[in-house]
Amino acid sequence: MNTKTLGVSLFLVALFLLFIKAFDISYPLKVNLSNSSGELSVVGEGKVDVVPDIAYIDAGVVVSGARTMDGARGKIDEVNNKLIESVKKLGISSSDIKTTNYSINPSYTYENNTNKITGFDGNATITIKTKKTDAVPLIVEAATVAGANQINNTRFVVDTPEKYREAAREAAIKNAKDQAAKIAKSLGITLGRVTNVVESIGSGGVVYPMDSKSFPVVANMGSAPTFEAGTETITSTVTLFFEKR
């Protein structure tokens, strides 16, 4: 490359950099000044197993083929009201019972180029929240005895997972540091300070058995279903960037 061509190339590069700075352009751009890296990055993982402390149950009633809208509404209201009352008898407060669906719709048949109403379908669903996770079997039993014909999306969660993420993060950092020390020893290099940290979080679960014997208030209702809540795994994955000396 002659001197004139080199000068033009440097001018274009400088102009490109000024353009980026002037218009505040941001995009993935990496410039390697040498073939050797001054950092070592190591990924560490940590986890904490936590027993869920909140349960949610969706329960409700579905009505099909009622002759009139009032007939569908009457049946839905009868079961819905009995359902709410039966759940309250288990000690669930009104603030933990939420109506999440209530709908009535006509059903049609197509005859002689005309849609004809043949009946009415409807459903109502309430979401029940409880901190007594071992009460879930009895809540489900009480709901079905009250006339509920749908139980959906029963789930167990940790109410405040952020309380446990710090412990998971500390475990991940320790894991990363331990691995970095082993790698440095194997490669014969010395590590300096941590220059950057990147964290990602997640969760999983394994089963945890429940016991409904502590709720004798509805013991005469029959055989309650068996549920398993699970333990929720709070996880943290940390990438540490170390100086290499």
Image (cartoon, helix red, strand yellow):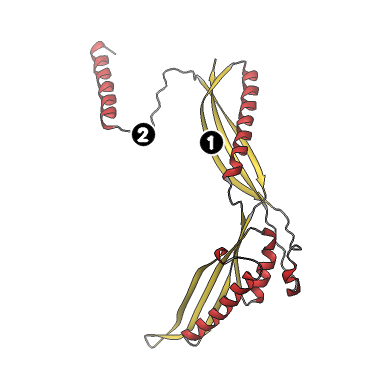
- Looking at the image, which residue is at 50% across and 70% down? 101
Residue situated in front as seen by the camera: 138 or 30: 138
In this rendering, the label closer to the viewer, 1 or 2: 1
Location of residue 98 with respect to 9 vertically, above or below: below
Location of residue 102 with respect to 207 vertically, above or below: below
Q: Position of residue 134 (x, y in %)?
A: 70, 60
| Apparent side of residue 15 relative to residue 138 in the rendered image (left or right) | left
Q: Position of residue 43 (x, y in %)?
A: 58, 31
Quarter where residue 117 is shown:
bottom left
Which amino acid type is marked by label 2?
A: Tyr
Q: Which sits earlier in the primary sequence, circle 1 or circle 2? A: 2
- Cα–Cα span, label 1 and label 2: 22 Å
Element carrying mark 2: loop
| Apparent side of residue 195 relative to residue 53 in the rendered image (left or right) | left
| Apparent side of residue 238 relative to residue 139 in the rendered image (left or right) | left
Q: Position of residue 74 (x, y in %)?
A: 52, 83
Which amino acid type is marked by label 1?
A: Glu
Can you say which quadrant of the picture contains the N terminus?
Answer: top left
- Looking at the image, which residue is at 34% across and 33% down? 26
| Label of residue 104 in the image | none
Judging by the rendered image, the residue that carries numbered circle 2 is: 27
Quarter where residue 175 is shown:
top right
Location of residue 103 with respect to 213 vertically, above or below: below
| Crowding at mark 2 (Cα within 10 Å: few <14, some 14-19, many 20+) | few
- Looking at the image, which residue is at 50% across and 88% down? 67
Judging by the rendered image, the residue that carries numbered circle 1 is: 199
Residue situated in front as seen by the camera: 231 or 129: 129
- Looking at the image, which residue is at 52% across and 30% down? 197
Element carrying mark 1: strand
Q: Position of residue 23 (x, y in %)?
A: 26, 32
What is the tally of numbered marks visible in this picture? 2
Can you say which quadrant of the picture contains the C terminus?
Answer: top right
